[in-house]
Amino acid sequence: MSTTAELLKGAAELFPGEVVTSAHVRHLDLPGGAGRFALITLDNGLDHTKPTTFGPQSLANLSAAIDQVEKEAAAGEIAGAGITGKPFIFAVGADLKGVELLTRHEDALAIGKGGHDVFKRLASLAVPTFAYYNGAAMGGGVEVGLHCTYRTVSASVPAFSLPEVFLGLIPGWGGCTLLPNLIGADRAVTVVIENSLNQNRQLKGMQVHELGIADALFDAADFLEQSLQWTAAVLRGEIAVARPEVDRGEAWDRAVERGRSLADGKVHGAAPAAYRALDIIAAAKNGDLRQGFDAEDQALADLIMGGEVRSGIYAFNLVQKRGKRPAGAPDKALARPVSKVGVVGAGLMASQLALLFARRLEVPVVLTDIDQERIDKGVGYVHGEIDKLLLKGRVNPDKANRLKGLVSGHLDKATAFGDADFVIEAVFEEMGVKQQVFAELEAVVRPDAILATNTSSLSVTEMAAKLEHPERVVGFHFFNPVAVLPLLEIVRGEDTDDASLATAFAVARKLKKTAVLVKDAPAFVVNRILTRFMGEIQNVIDEGTPIPVAEKAVEPLGLPMSPLVLLELVGPAIGLHVSETLHAAFPDRFTVSENLAAVVKAGKRGFFVYDSGVPELDPEVAALLRQGDTVLTEEQVRARVLDAVAQEIGVMLDEGVVAEAQDIDLCLITGAGWPFHLGGITPYLDREGVSERVNGKPFLAPGVASVPA
């Protein structure tokens, strides 16, 4: 038995639940007399919603297929060999469920070596090999193709990436070594580091070709046929594939340094994966593939044994599974149809909502406001955004005209909303204003119309208290920018009935949002945690800690931006309002900063100016600040902030604000950009011992998003 077979057999025993991918070999005669060809097709036997993956048995199946092709190539029976996937899917990499089960370094090392040993055989066949990227390709799916001599890609490929760094791993089956040697270090850094750290940004088929990863681009309709014709021309010598020479001089080093700057800016050294990947890319400059593969094996095993990848997979599963099956959501059958939507308000947030509803539901959307000028401006904004989509090729002219026709405005609420099924308000964040809006709406809408509020912190129950039918009021809290952030906090008031809630969840699904059921509690989930987090930062600044120290203290969390930059994005006035709301509800834990109040009173939009291109404390803000004389170290600041957050999450879980800690993490990942490598916040707090110190127990069960014992 070969070493590869032994490795894969041992690994397969650790992973009995693998969804096995088969590797079928079929033969065909290439056009133009180019010779007989062996085509391997990867297929897990499931529909296209269940992507093909590589677990140990799947790798063994591919290895067996290569055994057959290898013999045929050596005997001169074939002129070439290719690999492709089932419809819509090429392959999306290693089976992450198996990675979670690994508890020993040697087993993790075996997975890396096993994948390398199988994929390398494609490069060592006695005939040229071809990868036909017919559909989605990620991770190991991309890498198996990199081992081939040539590659084609379908123009319709929607998702192509090496997402491992995003999950706390590295592209460990050749990606870090082969890709820079194929397309150069700078482009490889873009794919491996930059795209991964930007929320797993995907490449389209055309981009894959433009980057030089694929040698040819073909239409989806007859992709395989065109690819085989192209293959025949290559084998007959009629097409010579020319690839630019890779610059192995200073440009390579600059690319790696750019990658380190990107990693520093995103994770601030808090997660090792990006840096391990960059080390291997740097070493790949010498073109020694064997050395690179060995380094990939070691890095992959080390990272699998670390906490970040467990957290990354935990976060991935939250978004892909729990996010699609919201805990506590009522029976879908109770949902009522929504054929027209009303939006109260025509400001920026309301206009963004109108655009989203029109694009996703494709039903009439009507805005109202206090005067026609505001309404015209809101409708104009929506129409302008649709024109931008048209210019970018995101919609065709017919679709653009149809979407514009769906969005209108009217000054009279009765005319605008009399036949609406779902009306959402996005007006000033003040309880009296919102109660008045709902009273006016109840007088004109149908008895079964849903009334939704986009409030970020106010009580949904109180908002509905004076209505004749409070049971149809639901919180529908979006996050800004509406088109980008996936989270939608759906808030159940004390009187909200199941039919209204089910309708809200049905609408959320059509909007393609990640919906989380939240109890009607002050500031709900994301704003409550961020306000406690920001409040503690503000407290230590007010007490005397310099702003740079307070800001730098939380860099190890690898957050997308520093606390005061985040405050600037949210808006100091909104931040102050939410802190006042939470202070009124929980005066023992939430404070209201006099310095923040002074900044808001002065009309400042943030603490920083950017004259030099980087944030620097605004001199006018510095003159407003009144600080004490208690100066903390970065470690002390970080401990205070994490303790405060852990305490607040513990209180929220005790109050039943959400069903479980997993919902807290899902909210922070999808609504606040909390890093995948942290898994949200609770795995990090567990891993650092903060949960135990503050609450006497971890948030998650042993083995969930934690380092294996």
Image: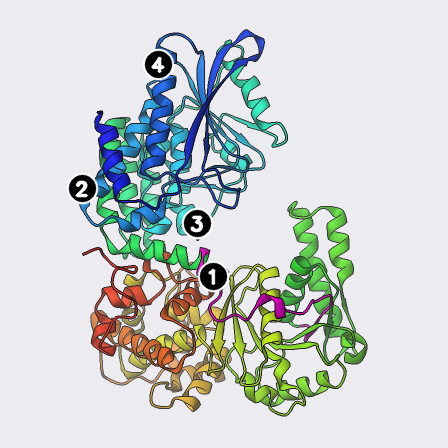
| Comes first in the chain, label 1 or label 2 | 2
The residue that mark 2 highlights is 106
Q: Residue 366, image x and y in percent?
A: 74, 70
Q: Secondary structure at mark 4?
A: helix
Q: Is residue 542 left or right of residue 352?
A: left
- Comparing marks 3 and 4, which lies closer to the viewer? 4
Disc 1 residue crowd, few under 14, some 14–19, many 20+, Cα 10 Å = many
Q: Quadrant of the N terminus?
A: top left
Q: Give the position of the C terminus as an image quadrant.
A: bottom left
Range shown magenta = 320-346
Front of the two marks 4 and 1: 4
Which of the two discs, 3 and 4, labels the residue nearer the N terminus? 4
In the picture of the structure, the residue carrying the numbered disc 3 is: 200
Measured as percent of width and height from the top left, residue 110 is found at 23, 37
Neighbourhood count class around disc 3 (C-alpha, 10 Å): few under 14, some 14–19, many 20 upward:
many
Between 629 and 31, the one nearer to me in the picture: 31
Displayed quadrant of residue 330: bottom right
The amino acid beneath tag 3 is Asn
Q: CA–CA distance between discs 2 and 4?
A: 31 Å
Verify CB contact (< 8 Å) between mark 2 and mark 4: no
Whole-percent x, y for residue 457 in the image = 50, 80
**Which of the two labelled residues, at mark 1 and mark 3, occupies the earlier sequence position?**
3
* Tag 3–tag 2 contact (CB < 8 Å): no
Q: Which mark is residue 71?
A: 4
Which label number is shown at residue 323? 1
- Dot 2 or dot 4, earlier in sequence: 4
Locate residue 659, reporting x and y percent: 41, 73
658 to the left or right of 417: left
